[in-house]
Image (spheres, helix red, strand yellow):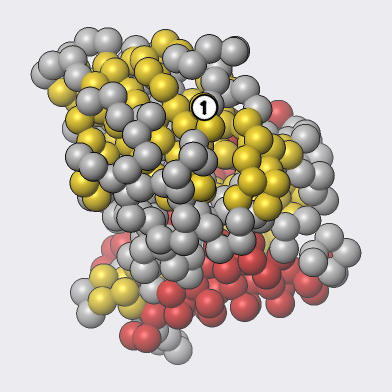
Amino acid sequence: MRGDYTSATVVSTATNYIMDKGNVFTHTFRSYIQLRENGSLNLKFWHSNAIDSTWDMGQVAVGSQLGGEWLIEAAFVADGGKTPDGKVVEGSQIPVTFAGKDSKKVTPGEKFYSDEVSIHLPEGHYLSFTWTITTCSPGKTYPFNVEQMLVTAYDAPGNLAHQESATSFTESENMLVFPSYIGYKKDVGEHIVFLGDSITQGVRTTKDAYEYWVARIAAEMGSNVGVWNIGSGWGRAYDTATDGSWLYKAKQGNKVIIALGVNDIDIGKRSAEQLLTDLTTIVSKIKETSPSTEVTLFTVPTFNFSGEQENVWRKVNHTILTHPPVGVSRVFDVAHVLSQAAPNDHLLKPEYMSSVYDPHPNGLAGKAISDAFMSWYRRHYGDSVLV
């Protein structure tokens, strides 16, 4: 997504699930997003009809699996107002078109752009995106993100994309159906892509608060630096190493920051050697596509591992810190930021836990990571592109 456009939001819309129904249906989805800049904007939407990362053990959705055939009946952007309450500001809806048409049939695995659309969004207002989707067959059709909601969204049965009111819409739970990328016309000094799992996505932080570490880093860097968050809940390095839809997105940055490994060690049961091989493959595939792309690798975040999983975690992080994969320009030790003092450094600091039982980093941890990362970033890069 380089060139004239950069990501307009830090919200990740990476896909990790797919709609699977026994019947054909029509449904409308309306989401509210805070943009990195408001005012007069020229927007384009890009979409990839494929699943980025595996959900659970892949019973329904597997990384790089293609979506099915479906139809965009209509799509609109609008001023969502100051409160994401299901309606949009009266008279503010603007149609989103595709090659000059209001509707578009989407084919399996297709990647496509919308036409450019211009909108004026007052400061403090949300961008609302609404689209109606009709499936073309029973079974698996369109990919979406099934994690905890980090933004407010609504959905309703039927073709209601044109409707300004909240009538018939209900608030969505664990279902963000949204284009893969919102770009706005902006000349930026860097295009940074953050590739990671739910910790990068920001899962377990407060809805609409933008308090996770990627959001905080983007705010600190300022709008002269492009930031695209493609963190995906339950994502793992071996999903990315297949060189499918997820890694395709990562390759769009001229800087790629990788924070993977928790789910490989946990649900993936990968050995240290397997995980390090997958990370090496990811880096090599990025560098093959664009040798000038700069890759930063994070250590595997602290996640309260014990037993053999703790041993794998320690071995992987020791290797990342001492002998990172060929092609890695720099390493950032995020585990050190999150960890308790040794010998309990495999445990997250209690104040950073999202709950007593959940080691996903909370908003306070997001600030700690952002502060440490920005200090590290300025030491290595200076402030030349930051505002």
Can residue 136 be seen here? The reply is yes
Whether residue 215 sits left or right of residue 268 in the image: it is right
Give the x, y percent position of residue 293: 75, 42
- 290 and 50: which one is in front? 50
Residue under circle 1? 95
Q: Quadrant of residue 15?
A: top left
At horizontal 28% and vertical 24% (from top left) the residue drawn is 159
Locate the N terminus by quadrant.
top right
Q: Amino acid at mark 1?
A: Pro
The secondary element bearing badge 1 is classed as strand
Whether residue 85 sits left or right of residue 298 in the image: it is left
Whether residue 244 sits left or right of residue 170 in the image: it is right
Whether residue 116 is situated above or below residue 166 in the rendered picture: above
- 6 and 26: which one is in front? 26
Locate the C terminus by quadrant.
bottom right
Q: Residues within 10 Å of mark 1 (few under 14, many from 20)?
A: some
- 45 and 22: which one is in front? 45
Give the x, y percent position of residue 227: 64, 52
At horizontal 29% and vertical 63% (from top left) the residue drawn is 308
Give the x, y percent position of residue 325: 63, 49
Give the x, y percent position of residue 142: 33, 25
